[in-house]
Image (cartoon, rainbow, N blue to C red):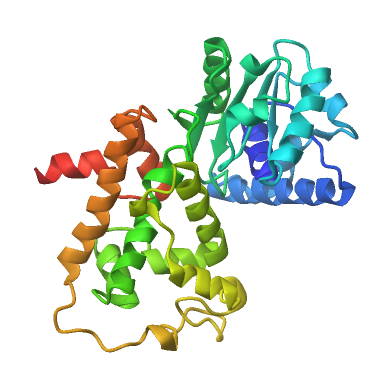
Amino acid sequence: MGAGIAQVALEAGDEVVIHDVDPGAVERARERVRSGLAREAAKLDVAADEVETWVGDRSARLRSAVTLDAVAAEAEIVIEAAIEDLDLKQTIFRTLDAAAPPDTILATNTSALSVAAIALATSRPERVLGLHFFNPVPRMALVEVVPGPATAPDIVSRAEEVVRSWGKTTVRSTDSPGFIVNRVNRPFTIQALRLLEAGEASVEAIDRAIRAADFPMGPFELMDLVGIDVNMAAAHGVWEGLGRPDHLRPSDIQDRLVAQGRLGRKTGAGFYDYSSGRRGPVAAEFLEPQDPSSLGRAAIEADILDAIYAEAQRAVAEGVATAADIDRAMRLGAGHPMGPFERRAATD
């Protein structure tokens, strides 16, 4: 994520300073940035004999710093992209806060932790906010902008201006579990798992129905792609953070697969088999005969998308985000062909 953020900033003409406690990670980030810039040059049809110069000009604005203090001392905006560990992030922000000039923006790329909790480590929580980018950063247009309860309005506006200058589309979310996308899109997989648990539809039938609704992939294909363990952790995080609502209760099916080490593509097995190196048939335990009363394509689609709409309504009612920002976020961050409110308006 850090390398991707650096790449889009360099493409926009900014200078970038990167830091990691592991020097090897810094070198790997440099290589990823150069590779990403080369791919971007190919997309832009930069002439073959000019690609090296094009990449070199942008890479020349990328430097590294040995310490966090050195980054904070000269940056106008610092974006932290460390692992999702609150203690670690608080340690980083404590150091940044002590070294950075008062008007420096301190942003976290967290997707799961409270911005307010991270800001508690600083003496100036008014300059701390969340800037949640989506992976891969160069391709994904969305950034969720998440002010904490103490974040100053001018900090939010300045941060939005920066990421928009990088070609990103911003949406605002309150500092609540899952922000917009990781919360509102939770039923995409949770409801699919409910249908499977109840024997109302098979893995393949559910994936087929959702692809037929113009989604790039079905829920089970998606879980296998991102990692069943990753999806399960997100599901538990949002569920716990929202007070364990029954409609978002994580599925025992995921817990069982994770316990078996079947995490999807990366382990060769999940809901589908990947032993051949590509997606194969559905795993044997999910091949139970279809019940004659099983749901059809339209009913499966409606069941899952209606659950997403209901969660979007809850998010609006709680003041998490506006309906327009939720629609925008679901299209740009979750690959939905239409946002939940747009879909409902089109079908009413």
Q: Is residue 264 above or below residue 345?
A: below
- Identified at 28% across, 73% down, the residue is 198
- Give the image location of residue 130, x and y in percent: 58, 30
In x, y percent, where is residue 167? 51, 31
Q: Residue at x 62, y 14 (%)?
A: 126
Where residue 162 appears, as percent x and y from the top left, is 58, 22
Depth check: 43 or 216 in front? Answer: 216
Name which quarter of the figure residue 55 lies in.
Answer: top right
Left or right? Give the position of 92 relative to 295.
Answer: right
Of residues 40 and 277, the one nearer the viewer is 277
- Left or right: residue 138 versus residue 104 is left
In the rendered view, tell whether residue 141 sits above or below residue 195. above
Q: Nearer the viewer, residue 18 or 197?
A: 197
Q: How many marks?
A: 0
Residue 274 x %, y %: 53, 81
Picture residue at 29% right of the left edge, 49% below the top: 308
Report if residue 61 is visible in the image.
Answer: no
Residue 294 is at least partly visible in this image: yes
- Quadrant of the snapshot with the C terminus: top left
63 with respect to 3 (left or right): right
Would residue 61 appear left or right of 113 to someone viewing this image? right
Residue ID at (57%, 49%): 136
Query: In what quadrant of the picture does the N terminus appear?
Result: top right
Q: Which of the 4 image quadrants contains residue 74?
A: top right
Q: Is residue 32 above or below residue 147?
A: below
The image quadrant of residue 86 is: top right
